[in-house]
Amino acid sequence: MFDPPEGEGFPDPFAGSEAAELDAKAVSAWFGERKVLDRVSLTMEAGQVTALIGPSGCGKSTFLRILNRMHEMVPTASLAGQVLLDGADIYDPGRRVTLARRNIGMVFQKANPFPAMSIYENTVAGLKLAGIKASRLEKDFLVEDSLRKASLWDEVKDRLHQPGGGLSGGQQQRLCIARSLAVSPRVLLMDEPCSALDPTSTRRVEETIASLRGLVTIVIVTHNMQQAARISDTCAFFLAAHNAPGAIVEHGPTDAMFQYPQDQRTSDYVNGRFG
Ligand SMILES: Nc1ncnc2c1ncn2[C@@H]1O[C@H](COP(=O)(O)OP(=O)(O)OP(=O)(O)O)[C@@H](O)[C@H]1O
């Protein structure tokens, strides 16, 4: 895909330092001929935590990957609909993929720091990719700021120049969160970020997510209903009927979704009766 070079004349249409609203409008997705999402619309409020829940294969990860233009990296993939970041469509022709990804970061299921690279270098590793130039002093500030926001600073401040691969799994996941935060994203997408972690590390990552509320908009896929209930403000329940594409059955404030679900299928799912 054509992606014009960095530099003057290509202003960032999504620029800003605040958490931004993300609005998916009638998003459908295909892998080859197979439709896997059908007209999904969802507003993910600025600064809030939105949890995407639903059984395996209903399209949650596909939807998440559409939100920062990663879906199009799969050769057979296609999509329809719009994704607006504070009103600007990230899929507008001519709009740069790199800018969408810089403003909408992603943390994956399995922590993926560069193992031989130091904690310091891992934290600022995204700057170059995002075309952000920073002096040593600016980097020093960014490293501390990002590691503090990721709730990792106190644990690593005395060993910033040791390899990232030497950290525990939970610390590595928080290092990846710090790396994402270092480029000042306005939205952070998280695809089951705790599924490979033990309960203590999970709790630390959940605390980190809670501390980021208001600073960045968070959209998280989770299979853990207790986690969704603990950390999210809003929930969207995805479901794919047999051989049908995934769609949202119900969405709304998390408390209401868990205590007074409007749809029987939501009630069955959040109470562990299927999936
Ligand atoms: N790269 C791909 N090529 C072809 N089909 C795919 C690809 N990725 C996902 N799919 C299909 O798209 C559908 C939705 O998958 P997706 O991973 O988005 O679901 P999910 O709800 O996130 O599942 P899980 O909770 O198990 O991660 C599934 O039927 C899956 O098999």
Image: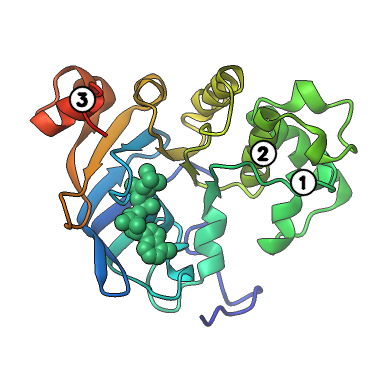
Residue under label 1, please give it: 122
Q: Position of residue 163 (x, y in %)?
A: 85, 40
Among the two numbered marks 3 and 1 on one chain, the one whose residue lies closer to the N terminus? 1
- At label 1, which amino acid type do we have? Asn
Q: Is mark 2 within 8 Å of ligand 1?
A: no
Within the image, what quadrant is residue 228 found in?
top left
Numbered disc 2: secondary structure: helix
Q: Secondary structure at mark 1?
A: helix
Label drawn at residue 178 = 2
Q: Position of residue 23 (x, y in %)?
A: 30, 51
Dots 2, 3 in contact, CB < 8 A: no
* Residue type beneath disc 3: Arg
Return the residue at label 3: 273
The three-letter amino acid code for the residue at tag 2 is: Ala
Neighbourhood count class around disc 1 (C-alpha, 10 Å): few under 14, some 14–19, many 20 upward: many
Q: How packed is label 3: few (under 14 Cα within 10 Å), some, or many (20 or more)?
A: few
